[in-house]
Image: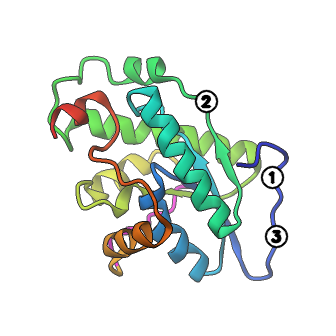
Amino acid sequence: MNSGPLLLKNVPGSRVILLHTCCAPCGSSSIERLLHEKNEVTIFFSNSNIFPEEEFLKRLYYAEKLANFYEIVLIKDDYDHESWRKRISGLENEPETGKRCFECFKFNLEKTAQKAKQLLISSFTTTLTVSPHKNSMQIFEAGKNFPDFCEYDFKKQNGFLRSIDLSKELDLYRQEYCGCEFSLKSC
């Protein structure tokens, strides 16, 4: 993990993009695709929705492993589960893919938009769309609140299957639930 200044390679013809990464498996094929398309990728690990904190730290460890593999920068956001809980207050009993998930997407995209602005990175996206358990259109709808959000459906081009292969190849931890305590209960 790089906690120092952001060092960009400034590859001619490349676009710099901040990638909100929920976990290493979802990040694996998403990063591969973005790099293949000549993007200069910086990972942003911002996941205060993850519960418990030990799970957050475990996913962070493997995200760092992934960043090291691709030799790209990873920036870690502070873990603040209480702020996330306040944001989704009243939506705790919503089903998976319901209003709680939509608000969670907006929470994480807002944090990523703020970080991109702070770093002077003009575009960002999220790995959340690689999961077959997530509705990409719902994520894109949440992203409409942020003018620098780029719509990438990482499920396309066999992104999810590729993430499974890369997870095995790189020995990445694949979790059993999305992240919050409510998704844990739905397993």
173 vs 150, nearest the viewer: 173
Residue 17: x and y in percent read: 64, 62
Question: Which labelled disc corresponds to residue 6?
Answer: 1
Residue 175: x and y in percent read: 33, 48
- Ranked by sequence position, the earlier of labels 1 and 2 is 1
The colour mode here is rainbow
Q: Residue at x 46, y 30 (%)?
A: 54
Question: Which labelled disc corresponds to residue 124?
Answer: none
Q: Is residue 18 visible?
A: no
Tell me where residue 157 sits by quadrant. Answer: bottom left
Q: Secondary structure at mark 1?
A: loop
* 164 up-or-down from 89: above or below: below
| Magenta stretch holds residue 152 | yes
Tell whether label 2 touches label 3 (CB within 8 Å). no
- Ranked by sequence position, the earlier of labels 3 and 2 is 3
Question: Which labelled disc corresponds to residue 78?
Answer: 2
Question: Which labelled disc corresponds to residue 9?
Answer: 3
Residue 169: x and y in percent read: 45, 73
Q: Residue at x 29, y 28 (%)?
A: 181
Q: Is residue 185 left or right of residue 36?
A: left
**Amino acid type assigned to the residue bearing label 1 in the image:** Leu
Q: Secondary structure at mark 3?
A: loop
* Cα distance between the residues tagged 3 and 2: 26 Å
| Magenta stretch holds residue 70 | no
Range of the magenta residues?
Answer: 148-156
* 88 up-or-down from 16: above or below: above
Residue 114: x and y in percent read: 63, 39
Give the quarter of the figure containing the C terminus: top left
* Cα distance between the residues tagged 3 and 1: 10 Å
